[in-house]
Image (cartoon, rainbow, N blue to C red):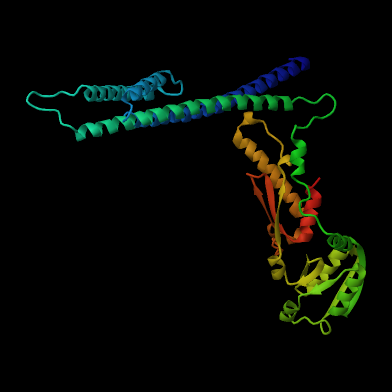
Amino acid sequence: MSKANGRYAIIIIAGLSAGMLLAQSARADDADLLKEAEARRAIAAQQAERDVRDAREESYKTARTQPGKALERLRGLLLRVDNDPDLTDQQRGALTSLLKRDLVALQKSNDDAKNPEIPSGFHLATKDPRAEDHRELVKGATDRIASAKEVIKEIHEIRDKRAVAFADTMMQVDKSAILPNGDISFPRNWKELSLLRTKKSQLTATERAILKSLDARITVDATDQRFGGMIDFFQKQMAQTIVLDKPSLDDLNINNESTTVSLHLDKVSTRTALKKMLADLGLTYIIKDETIFVTTPAKAKENLTVRTYYVGDLVPQYDLRFGSSIGQLQALQTINQLVNMVQNNIDKDSWEANGKEGGGTIVFSPPTMSIIVKQSAEVHYKVMQGLVP
């Protein structure tokens, strides 16, 4: 065999192999789709049978007061069973037999109530308790049938609306897959969705000044300096007031005069330098009442606040043809990425998820499409800067 013929043979074999793999993949996909269709049909059959049985119970209630109407509804229910495509042949046969027996019994009861037999030698009683009970039974059956008819009507309306909504959604999904020709068009309510992430919790001018001073760069070279003197140093550098939680400091035996600290940092943020100095003494700070409040980490946790941030417009819509479960997984994946971005980039040491003792948490609320954040005012401001347009 020549080299050229050998190459042609290899190409043909590779093509046949790829075709076999594609065929196997298609068969696997068809099998999965068939199983999904069978499962949906079984659920629909169970729901259809449940609807019929509920309507039958309601018919008996209606029969107490309106036997004629109850008979009419039972006949309509029998016709529905004959024509319902969701029912299996076994379910259809069982329900048909049951409804026919009901029709015979109810018809007989109705006839007996209209034409009671009076044996010779007896006189019709002025009030027959059994007749009263029978009338109550018929009235109840009639009421139930009437109620069931209304329920069935509502079920059909809901199914029709659901079909229209699903078709409209699928049309929107198909349209979203087409690349725009020109300017990008956003949903009609995009502006309203984005406004849900507006700054609901505005900072005061003093709080903004504190945060700005904490971001300023600073160089510190201090060895065995008084704690009180270092607090004065930071107050002067930041031009802000620092309040000490004296009871907490007393519990830790920290004194402005006798306690000394050493700090050597070059061109770092004032936030980093202050946190480092306080952490070495088992302390931290929070922004409270427009001041920097120095306290213990345990006390700082007690002052965390909870705020919600709408993120519904940050979670894209997904192709419903892949099923609701896959869509939910895609949405949760996007939310997890958003949460991880916040926890890894905004004051990383303040989140419990990072194994720290800061006490900060984030929880996603599906009903409101919001993240619920429990954090200090300083971190809330940073989260707000990242999420609010």
Residue in the image at 74% along x and 35% along y = 189
Residue in the image at 88% along x and 68% along y = 240
Residue in the image at 69% along x and 49% along y = 371
Quadrant of the image for the C terminus?
top right
Residue 226 in view, yes or no: no
Q: In the image, residue 148 lies at what x, y percent? A: 41, 29
Side of 133 where 187 appears, left or right = right
Q: Quadrant of residue 67?
A: top left
Q: In the image, residue 5 lies at what x, y percent? A: 75, 14
Q: In the image, residue 244 lies at what x, y percent? A: 79, 75
Q: In the image, residue 233 lies at what x, y percent? A: 90, 74
Quadrant of the image for the N terminus?
top right
The image shows a total of numbered marks equal to: 0
Q: Quadrant of residue 133?
A: top left
Residue 43 in view, yes or no: yes
Side of 298 where 155 appears, left or right = left
Side of 173 where 29 appears, left or right = left
Residue in the image at 70% along x and 25% along y = 174
In the image, residue 126 sits, relative to residue 383, either above or below, namely above
Q: Quadrant of residue 366?
A: top right
- Spot the residue most to the bottom: 258
- Spot the residue most to the front: 126
In the image, residue 230 sits, relative to residue 289, either above or below, namely below
Depth check, front residue: 165 or 349: 165
